[in-house]
Image (spheres, grey):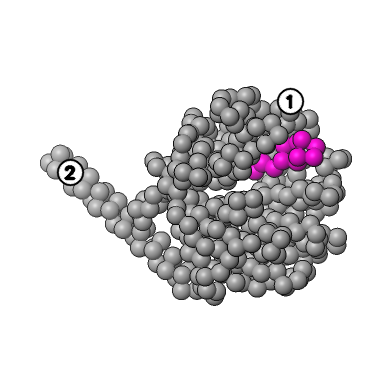
């Protein structure tokens, strides 16, 4: 009797698990269909789909990417897989993997030093690799949640967002810490001025954008995100003095005047966005969202933006990389068990 009871209980659990998987699949499919029906712009436009690149065996979340333009390679932070996948863009396939990483999130390529940097969230390290051989070339410990990476080629410095609130400053040549900039909470996307000395940092838990003086290594000002929360992606139009901050609650892009720190306009966009890019020569914005779309917006002038394309990608495909020199937008689509969708990179040719 005890055995029969256990068998029935096990069967019930298995049945419940099957039902849950089916329900999850139907929910995701329904949400994706609903999102598709809400499209407000044609699928045709400046983004042209090209053949996808498979990421065989890669499971879990995919975070940020970096490109080696001269080497025609793409580095993909496969966070849930504990690896960085190295893609040959010409061949359209994975050619190498850096494995054994603990939650890789940010990835950066510094061409002057042929250096690859990987920020790992689980152990808080920034790990360096010789990009030619992919052999380890040192590591720095930031204790917790090392995340986004940015490179200042003029100063030869790498910046990393980490922990409960800080930007780490690294000498790229020596791969040594040279400073830390305290923040109110964990930083998400941040952008560096090329003609100025400021860094704009999204700090979603604090509900603001931190404006950092990178010479003084301190916060000079904070700009609130009015009536919107979860400000994760960010892009900068330095020529027109505009900063683009995408919030998830609600799904909206705030456009700041970088002189006054005020929001001059805002517009709705794809949900669950994690990356936005500004294409200066053609005055366009590209936003990738986990809702399953990439959107292209035309900048008619510094204060006016028009949706010109909304193209389907995949559910939870919210991280992307725009490579101007290759005229490509690359969108990471993770492996989705309920939809039986394997991990891949969606590739779009960008009209210039």
> Decide: marks 1, 2 in contact (CB < 8 A)?
no
Residue 82: percent from the left, percent from the top? 49, 36
Query: Which is more toward the observer, 340 or 307?
Result: 307
Residue 309: percent from the left, percent from the top? 56, 69
Q: Residue at x 72, y 72 (%)?
A: 300
Q: What is the quadrant of the C terminus in the image?
A: bottom right
Q: What is the quadrant of the N terminus in the image?
A: top left
Left or right placement of residue 236 versus residue 325 in this view: right
Mark 2 is surrounded, within 10 Å at the Cα level, by few (under 14), some (14 to 19) or many (20 or more) other residues, namely: few
Q: Would residue 142 be seen by someone viewing this image from the given angle?
A: yes
Q: Which mark, by number, is residue 174?
A: 1
**Alpha-carbon distance for marks 1 and 2?**
62 Å
Residue 143: percent from the left, percent from the top? 64, 31
Give the residues in magenta: 145-158
Residue 274: within the magenta?
no
Considering only order in the chain, which callout, 2 or 1, is on the residue closer to the N terminus?
Answer: 2
**Secondary structure at numbered mark 2:** helix
Mark 1 is surrounded, within 10 Å at the Cα level, by few (under 14), some (14 to 19) or many (20 or more) other residues, namely: few
Left or right placement of residue 196 versus residue 94 in this view: right
Left or right placement of residue 9 versus residue 224 in this view: left
The residue that mark 2 highlights is 7
Query: Which is more toward the observer, 129 or 201?
Result: 129
Residue 113: percent from the left, percent from the top? 69, 31
**Secondary structure at numbered mark 1:** loop
Tell me: residue 143, above or below residue 25. above
Q: Residue at x 48, y 69 (%)?
A: 35
Q: Residue at x 50, y 41 (%)?
A: 88
């Amino acid at each position: 009797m005890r055995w029969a009871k256990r068998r029935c209980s096990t069967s019930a659990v298995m049945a419940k698990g099957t039902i849950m998987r089916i329900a999850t699949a139907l929910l995701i499919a329904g949400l994706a269909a609903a999102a598709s029906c809400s499209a407000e712009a044609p699928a045709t436009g400046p983004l042209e789909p090209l053949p996808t690149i498979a990421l065989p065996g890669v499971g879990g979340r995919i975070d940020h990417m970096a490109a080696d333009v001269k080497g025609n390679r793409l580095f993909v932070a496969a966070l849930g897989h504990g690896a960085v996948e190295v893609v040959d863009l010409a061949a359209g396939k994975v050619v190498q993997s850096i494995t054994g990483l603990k939650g890789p999130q940010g990835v950066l390529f510094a061409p002057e030093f042929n250096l690859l940097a990987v920020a790992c969230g689980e152990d808080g390290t920034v790990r360096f690799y010789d990009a030619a051989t992919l052999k380890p070339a040192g590591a720095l410990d930031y204790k917790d949640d090392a995340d986004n990476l940015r490179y200042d080629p003029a100063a030869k410095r790498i910046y990393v967002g980490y922990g409960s609130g800080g930007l780490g400053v690294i000498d790229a040549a020596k791969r040594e810490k040279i400073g830390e900039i305290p923040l109110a909470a964990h930083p998400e996307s941040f952008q560096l001025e090329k003609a100025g000395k400021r860094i704009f940092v999204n700090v979603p838990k604090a509900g603001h954008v931190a404006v950092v003086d990178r010479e003084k290594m301190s916060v000079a000002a904070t700009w609130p995100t009015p009536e919107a929360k979860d400000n994760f992606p960010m892009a900068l139009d330095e020529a027109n003095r505009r900063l683009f901050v995408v919030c998830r609650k609600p799904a909206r892009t705030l456009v700041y005047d970088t002189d006054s720190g005020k929001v001059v306009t805002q517009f709705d966009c794809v949900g669950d966005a994690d990356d936005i890019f500004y294409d200066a020569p053609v005055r366009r914005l590209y936003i990738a969202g986990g809702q399953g779309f990439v959107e292209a917006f035309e900048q008619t002038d510094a204060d006016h933006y028009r949706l010109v394309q909304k193209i389907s990608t995949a559910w939870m495909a919210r991280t992307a990389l725009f490579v101007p020199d290759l005229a490509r937008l690359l969108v990471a689509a993770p492996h989705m068990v309920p939809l039986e969708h394997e991990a891949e990179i969606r590739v779009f040719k960008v009209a210039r």
